[in-house]
């Protein structure tokens, strides 16, 4: 695990990240592979809300000389379409978000994702991620996007900038690829020397522009006794693949 960091790098930002990683034995939080920036969320939601009165008065004006039931039908149809758009909007924001449980077990790390709005959970065990479908009661290799075995720490192993604000410490990492058209931007926020969040942005075009959506890990608890329940069938699934299953402990309970 120490290979994540350059032992010769003694910069303050590197020492903060390294110390944080070494001291984390268990982490509970939330993860969203497509978290939208606040401005983007407000813009989309504001557009949806603004359409309601606009369409209503437009329909009313167009049908002012006809009977009211035509107005009810047209506005009802729009309301139905609006509801579909709102559901799509919520799915964009939270459809793949999950509660996250991460802990270290000797030389391995285990990360468990329990989705908020999907009847699934995923277990990243080592470098492989497996997914359980509660409806089908079956395990398979996961094709969804997840973090690696060490959360986002590999992405911030080479911090480039340290910034102290009134309420928190921010560590930034910027990497420009050879193509000069794509870049990575990573941001980690600490408060009272404790990790609060880790973000990873995709940057494209020159001059570089930050995308509206980004990968986000929000930390809620560190080194607590919280546990997560996993179907006992995962043991047989691992054995069938020739993998030693994670052992039950204070953080992992088989049910």
Image (tube, grey):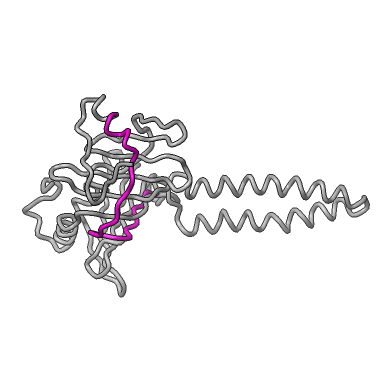
The answer to whether residue 183 is visible is yes
Q: In which quarter of the image is residue 137?
A: top left
Q: Position of residue 56 (x, y in %)?
A: 77, 55
The answer to whether residue 207 is visible is no
* Number of callouts: 0
Left or right placement of residue 7 versus residue 97 in this view:
left
- In this rendering, the answer to whether 169 lies above or below 175 is below
Residue at left 54%, top 59%? 42
Residue that lies at the very extreme toward the bottom in this rendered image: 166
Q: Position of residue 68 (x, y in %)?
A: 89, 52
Residue that lies at the very extreme toward the front in this rendered image: 255
Tell me the magenta residue range.
215-236
Residue at left 29%, top 29%? 237
Q: Is 237 colored magenta in this rendering?
A: no
Q: Where is residue 84 in the image (x, y as percent from the top left)?
A: 63, 45
Residue at left 34%, top 53%? 217
Closer-to-camera residue (126/205): 126
Question: Image quadrant for the C terminus?
Answer: top left
Closer-to-camera residue (183/199): 199
Q: In which quarter of the image is residue 144?
A: top left
Q: Where is residue 80 in the image (x, y as percent from the top left)?
A: 70, 46
Closer-to-camera residue (209/90): 90
Q: Is 232 colored magenta in this rendering?
A: yes
């Amino acid at each position: 695990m120490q290979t994540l960091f350059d032992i010769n790098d003694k910069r303050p930002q590197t020492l903060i990240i390294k110390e944080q990683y070494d001291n984390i034995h268990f982490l509970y939080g939330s993860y969203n592979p497509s978290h939208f920036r606040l401005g983007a969320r407000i813009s989309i939601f504001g557009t949806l809300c603004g359409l309601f009165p606009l369409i209503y008065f437009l329909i009313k004006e167009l049908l002012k000389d006809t009977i009211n039931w035509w107005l009810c039908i047209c506005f009802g149809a729009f309301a139905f379409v609006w509801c579909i758009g709102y559901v799509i909007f919520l799915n964009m924001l939270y459809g793949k978000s999950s509660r996250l449980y991460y802990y270290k077990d000797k030389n391995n790390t285990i990360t468990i994702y329990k989705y908020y709005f999907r009847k699934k959970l995923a277990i990243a065990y080592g470098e492989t991620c497996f997914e359980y479908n509660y409806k089908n009661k079956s395990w398979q290799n996961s094709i969804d996007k997840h973090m690696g075995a060490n959360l986002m720490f590999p992405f911030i192993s080479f911090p480039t900038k340290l910034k102290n604000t009134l309420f928190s410490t921010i560590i930034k990492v910027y990497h420009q690829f050879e193509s000069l058209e794509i870049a990575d931007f990573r941001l980690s926020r600490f408060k009272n020397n404790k990790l609060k969040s880790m973000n990873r942005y995709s940057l494209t075009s020159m001059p570089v522009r930050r995308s509206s959506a980004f990968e986000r890990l929000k930390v809620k608890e560190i080194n607590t006794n919280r546990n997560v329940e996993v179907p006992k069938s995962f043991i047989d699934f691992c054995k069938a693949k020739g993998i030693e299953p994670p052992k039950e402990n204070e953080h992992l309970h088989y049910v």
